[in-house]
Amino acid sequence: MNNVVQTANQLSLKTKAIALENLGFSYGQERAILTDVNLTISAGETVGLIGANGAGKTSLFLAVCGILKPTYGEVKLFDRSIEAGQFNPEIGLVFQNPDDQLFCPTVRDDIAFGLENIELPAPEVEARINAALSLTGVTHLADRISHQLSGGEKCMVAIAAVLAMLPQIVLYDEPSANLDLRARRRLIHFLNSSRETTVVSSHDLELIVEVCDRVVMLNQGRIVADGSPAEIMSNRDLMESNGLEVPHSLTHYHENLGKK
Amino acid sequence: MKLVLDRYAYLDSPVHRWQQSYKLIGLLSLIFAFAFVQNIWLLPIMVVITSILFTLSRIPVSFLIKRLRYPSWFILAVVFFLPFISGENIILQLGSLTLKEEGCWQALLISVRFFCILTVSLVMFGTAPFLSSIKAMRSLGLPSVIVDMSLLAYRYLEELSETLTTMQRAMKLRGFQPKGFTHRNLKVFSQLTGSILIRSYDRSLRIYQAMILRGYGSQTKIKKRQLKSTLVNSDRFSLIATSIAVITGICIMILELVLPSF
Amino acid sequence: MHIPDGFLPPQVCLTGYALTGGLTWYSLNQIKKDPDIQANIPKASLLTAAFFVASLVSIPVPPTSVHLIFNGLMGAVLGYYAFPAILIGLFFQAVMFNHGGMSTLGVNAIIIGAPAIAGYHLFRQREHLQGKRQILTKALSFAAGAGALLISASMFAVLLITCISPDMDVHAERTAILLSLVGYSIQAVVEGLFSVMLISFLEQVKPELLKG
């Protein structure tokens, strides 16, 4: 029995949630935004995507969701090759600016939006809204007007709106930008408890340290590092040559390792 | 939605060197003269003048063709129907449809006028950055309210367009695929539009605060000084070019009045 | 609903410019009476850009799709600022997309802008008329949106068809005008409904926007 459970665990861990095969993207004749990207993310992983501005993080997200059509290469979600322009319910994207995805009058309406698009029956819609509200801790905001919420509240409502669709993969684009410390702490706590395959793109490297079990570094559209967050982000030369800085919590990482 | 029009604003040509305020006066006179033309004999003259101007501007022909593509559909539609419904002298009979002579000439007149005016407009605005055109209009006396509104609206146009694109993508990622005309689809579009309006409105409040913190509202005297300096700093080349354009326009109008009708 | 260059005789173009000049002067005078003019100019400018961008959205109305014009709505939201806003919007459209022309800018501004002012006055009646506020707002929103479009469409159709050729048969002209008005009535209904929905959304989420 244990063997079966173990194998099942290994198999599910090995399920490729996202597979990018030799992906490239550029706008017409201009400089390439993404070049030869090969990346596999297993189901259940929480991966951090880091890189300087203009490295291609947002474009990578848009390509993975099927919004941008790659110039070459393939995107597979759970071994299914996706076509750009199609709606893929297994993946969700939380945009950097929550205002970009909250446009209905009330919070409840905004969460219901996606569910109505997939034509769920009303009781199911109601159930999912309540579940999403409770998961993100914003039940008390259900009937408030989205535009009038604070930055942190909007962030959690935007997440609720995406999670209500029950995606198996969730991408977060700069989720902690514009959050105060308390809201940020709530977000970190939330990300740590989420079970979906998660990819977080962020300049907030401390958040990545706390939340992610793997980090992928992009520079000018190419993957330049992929592995343990602590190892990669404590490497001063690597970080600085790619336009980043070693996060404060890791400045003494190697010294501490040595002491052990 | 990049302002593609500016793409060739940085070339070097006699037209590019023509000071924008003078260029506007000269080429607008030409446009009005072209709009004035009803006489078929003047069409070849219009085409020659337009071609000379366009060649001098060094704007690539491919760009002109691209710009002509969209409005040409309208022209084609009209031009196609006119010969069948307008006029009395029948030149061809196709079953129950009759091709009339006057209609054909009308169609030619409209097409050539359209083509020439459009090309001149392209040269007028495509040979300088768009902002220079707005500033030139200010120096020509356009009311300050309109100038301020134009500058600000232009400044935020591209950003708002990107915001709209991002919001539509967010909607699409949550399954919105509007196919028919339903109450729900219309409601979603109205909410999308409403959100863009609200976000612009909120943004404008912050912009206004930033503006007053940097002296907005205390500039009326400065603007009058600017107007005078523009006129004083004009160069002879621009003056001559404008005179040629205006005189050409007047000659065309005189010819239109004087020549026997076609 | 934009008349391109080359279509209209010069007298019509000049009249259009004269009328636009007049209405612009009048609108600016009304605007100058605004005690909050300094704050309202950035608001009006950003909203001009927002309406411009919104008019690029394609709304499916089978068998085709439409781009809404929003002139009644702009009147309701911007008041007298709507006329310069529309003039600027049309100028941008002419220069950027060759949608409408430079010689016909004056005419197009009257076609689209004058009904916007009418829409403003119509919508403003909700302050003066008796009746349940919500119903009144909905009715006047629809009237402003649909009405402004119908007036614009009528002016556009009549002008284009009568001016396009001096030799056109009167009967053909009349038929053409009627046919196009039937088509535009559908768009008018869409604009009216859209205006109702948008204004209720704004009332719910940001009522200050409607008090300008």
Image (cartoon, rainbow, N blue to C red):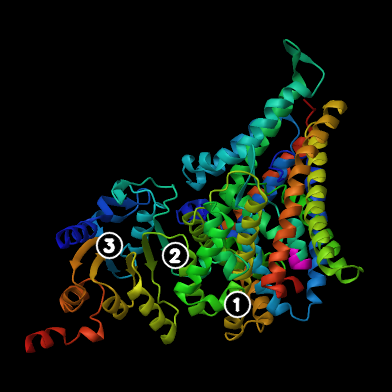
| Count of residue discs | 3
Q: Residues within 10 Å of mark 1 (few under 14, many from 20)?
A: few
Q: Specify start and end residues of the magenta stretch as a single range.
A: C77-83
What amino acid is found at the position of numbered circle 1 in the picture? Gln
Q: Is residue B43 magenta?
A: no
Residue placed furthest toward the front: A1
- Mark in the foreground, 1 or 2: 2
Query: Could you say which disc has been placed on residue B31 in the image?
Result: none
Name the subunit of mark 2. A
Q: Nearer the viewer, residue B159 or B258?
A: B159
Q: Are marks 1 and 3 on the same chain?
A: yes
What amino acid is found at the position of numbered circle 2 in the picture? Leu
Name the subunit of mark 3. A
* Label 1 SS: helix
Query: Could you say which disc has been placed on residue A163 in the image?
Result: 2
Q: Are marks 1 and 3 in contact (CB under 8 Å)?
A: no
Q: Are marks 1 and 2 on the same chain?
A: yes
* Residue that badge 1 annotates: A148
At x 64%, y 47%, the residue is C99
Q: Nearer the viewer, residue B243 or A72?
A: A72
Q: Residues within 10 Å of mark 2 (few under 14, many from 20)?
A: many
Q: Is residue C78 magenta?
A: yes
* Residue that badge 3 annotates: A220
CA separation in Å, label 2 and label 3: 31 Å
Residue placed furthest toward the bottom: A259
What amino acid is found at the position of numbered circle 3 in the picture? Gln
Q: Position of residue C152 (x, y in %)?
A: 79, 49
- Mark in the foreground, 2 or 3: 2
* Label 2 SS: helix
Q: Which comes sooner in the sequence, label 1 or label 2?
A: 1
Placement of the C terminus of chain C among the 4 image quadrants? bottom right
